[in-house]
Amino acid sequence: MKSQILQTLAALALIATSATAQDNPMENHTASYIAMPAAEGQSEAFAEFLAGAAPIVRDTEPGTVLWFALQANDTLAIFDIFADEEARNAHFSGAVAAALNQNADTLVDGGWDEGVVANINNSDVLSVKAPVDLSTATTATYIKLEAAPGKGPELAALLTAAGPIVADTEPETLFWAALQIDETNFAIFDIFADNSGREAHFAGQVAGLLNERAAELVAGGWDDGVVANIHNFDILAAK
């Protein structure tokens, strides 16, 4: 049965490039992910700063569809989804970015240029499970994937096909997005109410498919190319 499921999912991946806008409610959206090391002794202050930024994003950035402030020990991160490139540009010229710029020398190891700007990863949204019940979300995962040589289009197709599968089979995954950074680099970002939701996700059909195909599609395979690049975060605040 597992083999049949994986074969079916693989077939879906091959036809993903013909998916309709209905399959991807965030078609043509863009995303950004920034992981920032806190300056020594500033983790708590940095976390408070980011948590306080959420109302400003809500009030002043209509084109920022989703925004999350995240923390994993001394690493703080921001993940956001934008309606289009213009909205992303507006975000980076907005009030929160300006405040972070002003406070980066104090809060961020490396300051604005080396601690913030150098860590910006922009991407296009390939596929999503649309957000549900985000008020209950407490934890997030970001996974960066590098395609094996020549396998970028196939990995993109697999990830594009995965969004509807997550939507249909993972009720505890509150939001899921597949992202393309460039021709060879990709990422997955997802949100859960608790760790049980994350565990269900990693035991689910999409994780099974990625595990099955990782040796072929992902540089480093499953262990070194997927598992080693999993970054889990607590959610501090969200739009």
Image (cartoon, rainbow, N blue to C red):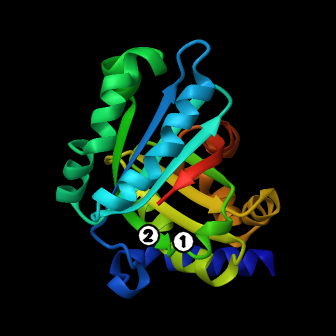
**Image vertical order of residue 198 relative to residue 71, above or below:** below
Secondary structure type for disc 2:
strand
Q: Residue at image x 66%, y 62%?
A: 137
Rounded to the nearest whole Å, what is the CA distance between mark 1 and mark 2? 7 Å
Quarter of the view holding residue 154 = bottom left
Q: Earlier in the sequence, mark 1 or mark 2?
A: 2
Q: Nearer the viewer, residue 146 or 79?
A: 79
Give the residue number, with chain letter if any, for mark 2.
127
List the residue tagged with mark 1: 162
Q: Nearer the viewer, residue 153 or 85?
A: 85
Label 2 near label 1: C-beta < 8 Å? yes
Helix or strand or loop: what does disc 1 sit on?
A: helix
Q: Is residue 190 above or below residue 128?
A: above
Q: Residues within 10 Å of mark 2 (few under 14, many from 20)?
A: many
Dot 1, crowdedness within 10 Å: few (<14), some or many (≥20)? many
Count of labels in the image: 2
**What residue is rendered at 56% in x and 51% in y?**
237
Say which amino acid is labelled 2.
Answer: Ser
Q: Name the kind of residue labelled 1 in the image.
A: Ala
